[in-house]
Amino acid sequence: MEGVNVAVSMMKVCCLHQEGQRHYNQGNVQGAIDSFRSALKKAKSINERHIENICTHNLASVYAAKGDKEYLEELLQSLPDQFIDDIMQEEGNNIIYLRAVANRSVSHYEQALKVVSDSRTQTYLLEQLVKQLSEEQDSRKKIKYLEQLKEGFRVKRNDMRRFQVMCQLARLYIRDSSTEDAQKVLRELKKEVDMTSKKFHVYKE
């Protein structure tokens, strides 16, 4: 009978986990927190340490997205070192990324950018860096990250985002009196827009 109760509780944990993921993907942070908290409580009640660690990590991920770095650290410190090591190996420095998301600082974003390998995550980090960096004090660094974004969007064939980044680059080059660099970007942009326009007309016909 005890085994049946444990199995039922495990199913409940899985359902709560899926519910939390659904809330998180829909942008319902509080709903995700409530579901993951309930899953963690249920996992503790059946003394399933590994499942408890997974629930704790999921909850930490939501608090990172919320920007609550204090509670993120509290949750991470409650995880065993071996679990942290496993997560780092399996998910590509996941903990460093979570700290970057929670702290929302240039230094944390840059640290995470050095270790993540997923292109979607790299794009997110680059976009956050561009937002954070001041044009007055960090224009060269901002240009560097915009160049990386431009290349990333080229690989992904996201033309509209790439064109937006190129416009930002041209404006920064002009601001820095780098006329030659600005003209180069604008020529490239015109060429790309013309090519895209031709493709559109071909599809339309």
Image (cartoon, rainbow, N blue to C red):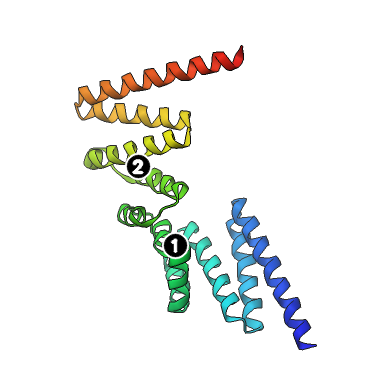
* Residue 149: mark in rendering: none
User: Where residue 178 appears, x then y in whole percent?
Assistant: 20, 26
Q: Residue at x 37, y 18 (%)?
A: 190
Residue position marked by numbered label 2 in the rendering: 130
User: How many neighbours does mark 1 have within 10 angstroms: few (below 14), some (14-19), or many (20 or more)?
Assistant: some
Across and down, in percent, residue 104 comes to 38, 54
Q: Nearer the viewer, residue 130 or 66?
A: 130
The residue at the far top in this view is 205
For residue 175, side relative to residue 119 (left or right):
left
Q: Amino acid at mark 2?
A: Val
As drawn, 52 above or below 145: below
Q: Nearer the viewer, residue 66 or 83?
A: 83
5 lies left or right of 30: right
Q: Is residue 91 rendered to the left or right of residue 129?
A: right
Instruction: State the residue in front, 86 or 190.
Output: 86
Residue located at (48% from left, 20% from top): 196
Residue drawn at x 61%, y 61% as measured from the top left: 32
Which structural element holds mark 1?
Answer: helix
Please state the horizontal and vertical placement of residue 83, each as a whole percent of the image.
48, 75
In the rendered image, the vertical position of residue 71 relative to residue 196, given as above or below: below
Say which mark, if any, is on residue 94. Answer: 1
